[in-house]
Image: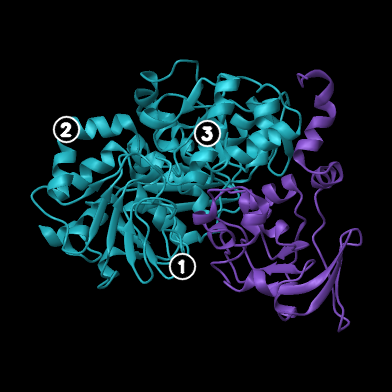
Chain colours: A purple, B cyan
Amino acid sequence: MIYQGRVWKFGDNIDTDAIIPARYLNTSDPGELAAHCMEDADPEFVSKIKPGDIILGGENFGCGSSREHAPIAIKAAGISCVIAKSFARIFYRNSFNMGLPIFESAQLWTAIAEGEEICLDSSLGQISTLTGNLTFSINPIPPFMEQLIAAGGLMKHIAKPFNKNNLVK
Amino acid sequence: MGHTITEKILMAHTDLPNIHPGQLINARVDIALGNDITAPIAIKEFRKAEGRKVFDKDKIALVLDHFTPNKDINSAMQCKFVREFALEQNLTHFYEGGNVGVEHALLPEAGIVLPGDLVIGADSHTCTYGGLGAFATGVGSTDLAAAMLTGELWFKVPQSMKFIISGSLQKWVSGKDLILNIIGRIGVDGALYKAMEFTGETISKLSMADRLSMANMAVEAGAKNGIFPPDEITREYVEKRAKRKYTFYSSDADAEYCDVIEIDARKIEPQVAFPHLPSNVKGISVAGNVKIDQSLIGSCTNGRIEDLRIAARILTGRKAAAYVRLIVIPATPAIYRMALQEGLLETFLSAGAIISPPSCGACLGGHMGILAEGERAIATTNRNFVGRMGHPKSEVYLANPAICAASAVLGRIASPEELE
């Protein structure tokens, strides 16, 4: 897959309260959640982004609550993928399980300025800038996660072998 | 090579002859938990996968504790959606209304989670049950859906970090201070993807309430789970509550740890985590003059009867300072009743406190106890991120119940020592 868009930079430890504040959790509607995406980190975020744009986080992106509303809000806002130095573990699980592509890169954050356009090729495992000649490699996705993505998320993945025997229709 | 307690519990829930850190496994789940925020998404995912029946109606717990008593129409709709699912599936463990408590206080109290269990919950503080010697970890709603359908879930076997804590605790120091101190040392991602195993002489004397409150905050260091070796204190807590078999696991002497950290508890004074990270910790003696607008005593971290007793001890014959809102939230109906019978509620009312029904609402800035712009709260809760308890320009300071009670009386962050 190719992901191309402008980069929006955030610092370390962006927590799920910043990604989608709890005051909006009285719904799980993706459209409503998207309207408040990243609101407590950058109140203007939703009005600035274009479909396909990319979030670039620092260490421990998505720490805090287990709310799946966080990756849902990011995906529904039109963000194509999230790149960070590292991810908090529940956010990492949730993103793969519900199909938001996320990638780890230790170098990108310091090398790229906000607003710069980048292209990420997940099959090549490479990120490149559109203006300059910079390229970066991304950490490979574990094979198990590739299976999840290929199946279209966790529920589709487990439904495959499970369908025949256990699903009461 | 031996195994840690975490590895042993995970292994016991697979058919594998051996497992090692880093390995991806499918494991059987003993209890799967959801709440009024996370269960609606899980139920929708369950339906999308054409799920008709949950794998075991006795192994799923749905607890409507976050925005309840229902704060608005949307919240009421979410609760109704979950309630209808619980009724349709005839779930044994469904909690709403008069029997609801804060989930992570409620499930151990009711004997629903037990030592040796593998517990997943669509709530990050599910790691609380590590206090009982269970493997318990927070997951997302889709994970919950998968577990409700199949009774299994995928896990990466975590590396383990061992904390050896020795020495007796100073006055007013509790499990909360130990865990805040540890998070201050290692940072909010210091245990990312890892198991935190708490051992040592101090731990072996620690009450179940303190163990649960420490395991509760393992996630604030990024950990997958926090875990305590079960012992006689565990047995005493569990044997009167358990309605099924449970197993005590312990780490082998030659188990492998990625890190071993020794801590001298004698040097730890009551801790305060300043905004806006749980790792931004200072000792109470250097907290300085921080005025507060609200003090909150409750939550899955510190809303147990032991916590309320400590607060009441400090508040007896005293009043919250003028213009300071003191909110006390007994975490479960049983704790509420005990507090009533022991006269603690009388003490709180006389101190000018608001006594809330069991709810998670205030802790996450969702419901009852929300902060305005520029306001400051001290709380026995577990997170102090930007906007956690209300306006993005409000502040949350985390501390133990004694500090929160003393701070309410003095109107600024303070130690009970100042009242004596």
Residue B7's disc number: none
For residue B251, say whether it is visible: no
In the rendered image, which quarter contains the C terminus of chain A?
top right
Find the distance from the CA under tag 2 to the CA under tag 3. 35 Å
**Image coordinates for residue A47, horizontal then vertical, percent:** 66, 72
Residue B280 relative to residue B167: left or right: right
Find the distance from the CA under tag 2 to the CA under tag 1. 38 Å
Residue at x-position 36% and y-position 35%: B208
Q: Amino acid at mark 3?
A: Lys
Task: Identify the element where label 1 is drawn.
Answer: loop
Label 2, residues with CA under 10 Å away: few <14, some 14-19, many ≥20? few
Label 1 resides on the chain identified as B
Report which residue position mark 2 lands on.
B342
Report which residue position mark 1 lands on.
B392
**Image coordinates for residue A86, horizontal then vertical, percent:** 67, 61
Report which residue position mark 3 lands on.
B80
Q: Amino acid at mark 2?
A: Glu
Compare marks 2 and 1 and give the one earlier in the sequence: 2
Label 2 resides on the chain identified as B
